[in-house]
């Protein structure tokens, strides 16, 4: 389940990159002799093949069953970029409430039916925070959050 949340978080970060399109290849000038004119009839077949292969790549990145788990550097990058968003008081650590808000957002991204106030979700959040809080100081720093999310990959 944590893998799904991590994947959803990574997809949220990667969505703008995946939405970018590449510039079309420059058009070739029309041929003037009879032998070169037969080339354009075979040339469109190559772009059609490339176009038909192009939609398959984004579909496989959204297919959670075949998606590869995010690497350690991706997890660290995601934590670095999102940590400040959830560190509401700016103390460089996440309280249980701040951590819970982040984990619910990740879980909701992978499972829209997630209810933050449900007993099951609260139980899961309690266990997740306890597992992530390695030094048992009731607050999580970036290293603890990163380590926790990386554990879910294995």
Image: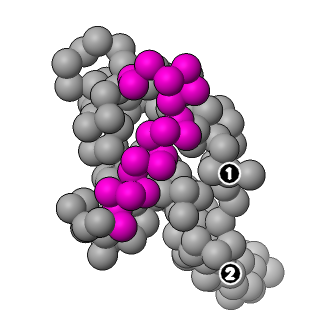
Q: Does the magenta segment cover residue 137?
A: yes
Instruction: Tally the marks.
Output: 2
Q: Earlier in the sequence, mark 1 or mark 2?
A: 2
Residue drawn at (59%, 58%), measured in percent from left and top?
3
Q: Position of residue 26 (x, y in %)?
A: 55, 56
Q: Position of residue 145 (x, y in %)?
A: 50, 32
Residue drawn at (20%, 25%), measured in percent from left and top?
88
Q: In the picture, residue 59 is in which quadrant?
A: bottom right
In screen coordinates, is 104 left or right of 145?
left
Range shown magenta: 120-139
In screen coordinates, is 71 left or right of 6?
right
Q: Nearer the viewer, residue 128 or 16?
A: 128
Q: Position of residue 53 (x, y in %)?
A: 65, 77
- Which secondary structure is most common in the magenta stretch? helix
Decide: few, some or many residues near mark 1? Use Cα within 10 Å; few <14, some 14-19, many ≥20.
some
Residue drawn at (48%, 57%), measured in percent from left and top?
5
Q: How far apart are labels 1 and 2 at the CA level?
A: 35 Å
Q: Does the magenta segment cover residue 138?
A: yes
Query: SS class of the residue under badge 1?
Result: loop
Colour pattern of the rendering: one colour
Q: Is residue 150 visible?
A: yes
Q: Position of residue 27 (x, y in %)?
A: 55, 62
Residue drawn at (32%, 35%), measured in percent from left and top?
96
- In the displayed structure, 44 sits above or below 12; it is below
Image quadrant occupied by the N terminus:
bottom right
- In the displayed structure, 139 sits above or below 125; it is above
- In the displayed structure, 144 sits above or below 75; it is above
Q: Nearer the viewer, residue 58 or 141?
A: 141
Residue 153: mark in rendering: 1
Residue for badge 2: 49
């Amino acid at each position: 389940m944590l893998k799904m949340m991590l994947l959803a978080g990574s997809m949220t970060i990667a969505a703008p990159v995946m939405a970018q399109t590449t510039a079309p290849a420059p058009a070739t000038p029309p041929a003037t002799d009879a032998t070169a004119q037969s080339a354009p009839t075979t040339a469109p077949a190559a772009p059609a093949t490339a176009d038909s292969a192009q939609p398959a790549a984004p579909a496989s990145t959204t297919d959670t069953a075949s998606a590869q788990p995010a690497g350690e550097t991706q997890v660290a990058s995601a934590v670095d970029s999102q940590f400040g968003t959830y560190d509401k008081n700016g103390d460089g650590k996440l309280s249980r409430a701040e951590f819970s808000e982040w984990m619910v957002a990740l879980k909701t991204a992978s499972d829209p039916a997630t209810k933050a106030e449900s007993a099951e979700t609260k139980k899961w959040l309690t266990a997740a925070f306890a597992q992530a809080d390695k030094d048992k100081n009731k607050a999580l720093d970036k290293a603890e959050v990163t380590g926790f999310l990386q554990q879910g990959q294995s």
